[in-house]
Image (tube, rainbow, N blue to C red):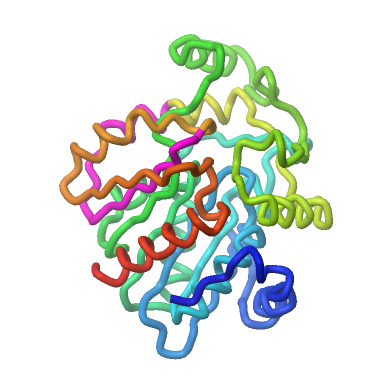
C-alpha cells in the first residue's frame, strides 16, 4: 500500500498540488437549486472506485493528500462538495452560516452526482466513503439506493451529536421551536463565522502538520471557509439522525470510530452496528474526530482497513 506520511508531506507538496491541478478533472454540476463543485481522477485500469461524501465545512481540496494516495494505489476517486460548503453554492447571503433545508437535499444532490457524473465515467465496483455529516448522508443514501455501491465505509459518522451542556432533548425542542417561528437562519448559541482555532484547542485531529495544512488552505482560499451551524441545519440534522437510528444498511458496512471524538457522540455505534446485517465496528485508539486527517499511527491503519474492506467486497 502506498502511504503519504506526515514526515514527507513537505517533500510531497509539489506532487500533491500537481496531481490536484493537472490530473484531477473538476467541473460544476447544475442542480435545480445551484451548482455543485466536483472532481475526479481515474487511473489506467483502476481496481475500483471510491466516492467520497465529506464532512461539514469540508471542501474537496481539503482531501488532496488522500485523493493523491488513493490514485497512487490505482483507485479511481470521485468527490463532490455538498451544497452550502466548499465551492458549491451557498444558501444565504452570509456564506459562513451552515444551512440546509432538509438532509434529503444532500441525498438528492449525491444521487445526481453519482448517476450523472460517477456512473458516466465508471461502471465497475465502487465503494462509498463518508465522513461525519457525510457519513450520515452516505448511510441514508445506500439505504435508499443499495444498487449503486458494493459497500460503504463510514469514518466517525454523525449518528448522534454532542450537545455540550444542553440536554439533547432540549436542544431538539429548541431547534424545532425556533424553526417553527423563524427562518432558522441564525447561528445556534456558541457558533459564529469561520474561526481558525489554534491547534492546541482543536477537536479534529492530533496531527499538527495535517491540521496546519488544512488551516493554511482555508486561509489562502477564503471562499472555502464555512462557519457554525444555524437552527435550520441543526433541526434538519436531528430529524435525519432520528431516521438513521432505525435504518438497516442492505450492503456491507464498516464503521470507524474515533476513541476521543468530541464532535459526534459514538455511544450509539455499538448497538447500531449490532442491528445491521453485515457491519464491522472498529475503534481507533487515541484518535480525534477526523480519522482521515489523523497522525500516521492512526491514519495508516485506517487506510489499510479501508483498502482491505474495499478489495474484499
For this orientation, the residue located farthest to the bottom is 44
Left or right? Give the position of 233 relative to 298: right
Report x, y in % for residue 9: 68, 68
Q: Is residue 308 magenta?
A: no
Residue visible at 77% across and 33% down?
193
Report x, y in % for residue 62: 65, 58
**Number of numbered discs on residues:** 0
Residue 212 versus residue 53: which sits nearer the camera?
A: 212
Q: Quadrant of the N terminus?
A: bottom left
Q: Relative to 13, is 148 above or below?
A: above
Q: Range of the magenta residues?
A: 239-261
Q: Is residue 254 magenta?
A: yes
Q: Quadrant of residue 146?
A: bottom left
Report x, y in % for residue 160: 42, 29
Residue visible at 48% across and 28% down?
161
Left or right? Give the position of 67 relative to 104: right
Residue visible at 25% across and 49% down?
280
For this orientation, the residue located farthest to the right is 220
Q: Quadrant of the C terminus?
A: bottom left
Q: Relative to 225, is 78 above or below?
A: below
Left or right? Give the position of 193 relative to 125: right
Residue visible at 51% across and 77% down?
71
Residue 175 versus residue 12: which sits nearer the camera?
A: 12
Q: Relative to 238, is 285 above or below?
A: below
Q: Quadrant of residue 304?
A: bottom left
Residue 48 versus residue 285: which sits nearer the camera?
A: 285
Left or right? Give the position of 46 relative to 199: left
Report x, y in % for residue 230: 64, 27
Amino acid at each position: 500500500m502506498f502511504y503519504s506520511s506526515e514526515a514527507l508531506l513537505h517533500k510531497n507538496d509539489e506532487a500533491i498540488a500537481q496531481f490536484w491541478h493537472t490530473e484531477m478533472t473538476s467541473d460544476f454540476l447544475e442542480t435545480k437549486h445551484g451548482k455543485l463543485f466536483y472532481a475526479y481522477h481515474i487511473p489506467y485500469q483502476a481496481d475500483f472506485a471510491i466516492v467520497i461524501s465529506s464532512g461539514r465545512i469540508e471542501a474537496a481540496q481539503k482531501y488532496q493528500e488522500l485523493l493523491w494516495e488513493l490514485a497512487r494505489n490505482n483507485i479511481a476517486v470521485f468527490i463532490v462538495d455538498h451544497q452550502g460548503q466548499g465551492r458549491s453554492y451557498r444558501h444565504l447571503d452570509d456564506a459562513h452560516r451552515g444551512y440546509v433545508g432538509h438532509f434529503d437535499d444532500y441525498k438528492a444532490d449525491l444521487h445526481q452526482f453519482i448517476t450523472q457524473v460517477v456512473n458516466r465515467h465508471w461502471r465497475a465496483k465502487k465503494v462509498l466513503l463518508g465522513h461525519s455529516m457525510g457519513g450520515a448522508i452516505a448511510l441514508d443514501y445506500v439505504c435508499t439506493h443499495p444498487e449503486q455501491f458494493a459497500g460503504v465505509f463510514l469514518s466517525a459518522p454523525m449518528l448522534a451529536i454532542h450537545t455540550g451542556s444542553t440536554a439533547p432533548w432540549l436542544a431538539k425542542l429548541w431547534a424545532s421551536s425556533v424553526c417553527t417561528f423563524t427562518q432558522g437562519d441564525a447561528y445556534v448559541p456558541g457558533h459564529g463565522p469561520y474561526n481558525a482555532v489554534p491547534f492546541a484547542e482543536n477537536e479534529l485531529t492530533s496531527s499538527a502538520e495535517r491540521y496546519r495544512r488544512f488551516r493554511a488552505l482555508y486561509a489562502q482560499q477564503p471562499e472555502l471557509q464555512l462557519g457554525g451551524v444555524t437552527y435550520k441545519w441543526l433541526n434538519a440534522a436531528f430529524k435525519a439522525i432520528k431516521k438513521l437510528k432505525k435504518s438497516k444498511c442492505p450492503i456491507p458496512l464498516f464503521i470507524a470510530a474515533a476513541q476521543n471524538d468530541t464532535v459526534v457522540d459514538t455511544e450509539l455505534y455499538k448497538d447500531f452496528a449490532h442491528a445491521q446485517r453485515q457491519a464491522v465496528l472498529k475503534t481507533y485508539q487515541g484518535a480525534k474526530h477526523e480519522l482521515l486527517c489523523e497522525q500516521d499511527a492512526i491514519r495508516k491503519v485506517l487506510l489499510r482497513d479501508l483498502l482491505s474492506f474495499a478489495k474484499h467486497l
